[in-house]
Image (spheres, grey):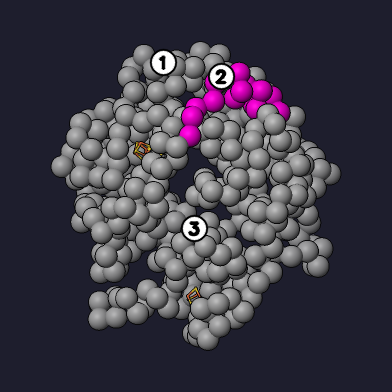
Amino acid sequence: MASCYRVPLRVAQADARRLVRRLTRRGFLVSAARGAAPAHARVVAPSGSGPLGVDISLTGACNASCSYCAYAPQMCSRRDLPTAEWLAFFAELGRLPTRNVTLSGGEVFLRPDLWDLIDGIVEHGLRYSILTNGSRLDRRTVQRFDESRRRVRLDSIQVSLDGSTARVHERTRGAGTFGPAVRALRLLHDAGLPVTCRVTVNRHNVGDLANIAGFLLDNVGLRSFGTNEATPQGRGFVNRDEVTLRPEQRVQAMRTLSALARRYPGRVLAMAGPLAQARVFAAMRAARAGRAAAPPGAGRLTACGCVFARMAVLHDGAMVPCSLLPHLHMGRINRDSVSRVWRGHRYLQALRNRRAIALARVPGCETCEWARVCNGGCPALACELTGHTNRANPLDCYRLFLQETRGVAR
Ligand SMILES: C[S@@+](CC[C@H](N)C(=O)[O-])C[C@H]1O[C@@H](n2cnc3c(N)ncnc32)[C@H](O)[C@@H]1O
Ligand code: SF4
Ligand code: SF4
């Protein structure tokens, strides 16, 4: 940090100590030395007066029509909020412990008031990230990050890219989308902005992953890129037979991405999808065989800590626990208090309380030989796909994966 911000080491250390003291005072950090605290509370206490981060869908408008878009049904059925509503919401977040917002959609650069909204975010002391398809990013747009404090408050800007060629990328993201996405990546990178890229692994690009990595890391020169996987939600559900990975393709993606992660250390990232899954499954095998300690939280529904730190708002102002759970309405911004929703809404509480549930008691997992070392996978997808909060996510289930890939060499 000291070298990054060009300040003496002792100044950075004093700042870090001060930050830890403030976070502890406000209840966001609990000392790990207090052995009685549950695993999740050692990181973030859910009783803080507001989320640390909010994922915001600013618009339901989009100029693309990706064949797996999970947000597509929401885009048709909800209306965008006007500028003033978002600005009032950012003012409220500025009074809470919230540190950053992630702006997504739809396509945020289609909002004509985007820069006013970003200035509102900055004005209220928040940091921000952007998710974009890159189509509207030309030289002039990129220069606008240099106005006001927009650049220094920007944590990251992520462009989606699904292939190393137009042929592969446009199979899922539509004709004419590859060139603009690549131009956006290059312009942002050349401008020194914190650009990153997301590759959504699907049936059409699984054979192109090595080329994509080479293109992004060696050719464009990105520091890193993230990967996930096209899930059967929204349009991804409708088109699941065309886009979601087949079992043998999942194995192929796991192998390729794991090899790429070894070849480019620290530069191929994954919070979900085949690479993340490969790592979780390897840790489960090692723990069950006694070669390693069980992963933290193993044996209970503990996979994701998001509900202790973040929540989401859809483009009509509906507050939801996570953008993957658009039907769990907890209130509406500027009508209901964020703080009250954050502290006490039953949906958030139910999702947080999952952590106490042993997998041995979860329907479908009772007799599983992996239950002791499993964490149940993504809670949002578990709810969305099974209709029950306290279930495991079938897409992250190792026993199911083994059944489906029997006969596929691993
Ligand atoms: C909903 S989009 C919104 C931002 C912007 N329009 C874009 O495409 O980057 C945000 C990210 O979610 C990903 N995404 C959309 N539907 C998905 C699905 N069913 N499974 C996994 N990722 C998905 C997109 O590929 C994109 O990287
Ligand atoms: S994934 Fe992004 S670009 Fe594609 S349709 Fe959805 S919102 Fe639009
Ligand atoms: S059935 Fe699947 S989700 Fe349940 S404990 Fe076993 S591996 Fe985990």
Q: Is residue 285 magenta?
A: no
Residue type at tag 1: Gln
Q: Nearer the viewer, residue 253 or 378?
A: 378
Q: CA distance from mark 3 to mark 1?
A: 40 Å
Q: Which residue is mark 1?
A: 143
Q: Which mark is first along the chain, 1 or 3?
A: 1
Q: Which residue is mark 3?
A: 384
Residue type at tag 2: Thr
The quadrant holding residue 222 is top left
Nearer to us of marks 2 and 1 is 2
Q: Main secondary structure of the magenta part?
A: helix
Q: Assign a secondary structure to mark 2.
A: helix
Is residue 102 visible in the rendered image? The answer is no
The residue drawn where x is 66% and y is 23% is 88
How many residues crowd mark 3 within 10 Å: few (<14), some (14–19), many (20+)?
some
Q: Is residue 167 left or right of residue 172?
A: left
Mark 3 touching mark 1, by CB under 8 A? no
Q: CA distance from mark 3 to mark 2?
A: 31 Å
Nearer to us of marks 3 and 1 is 3
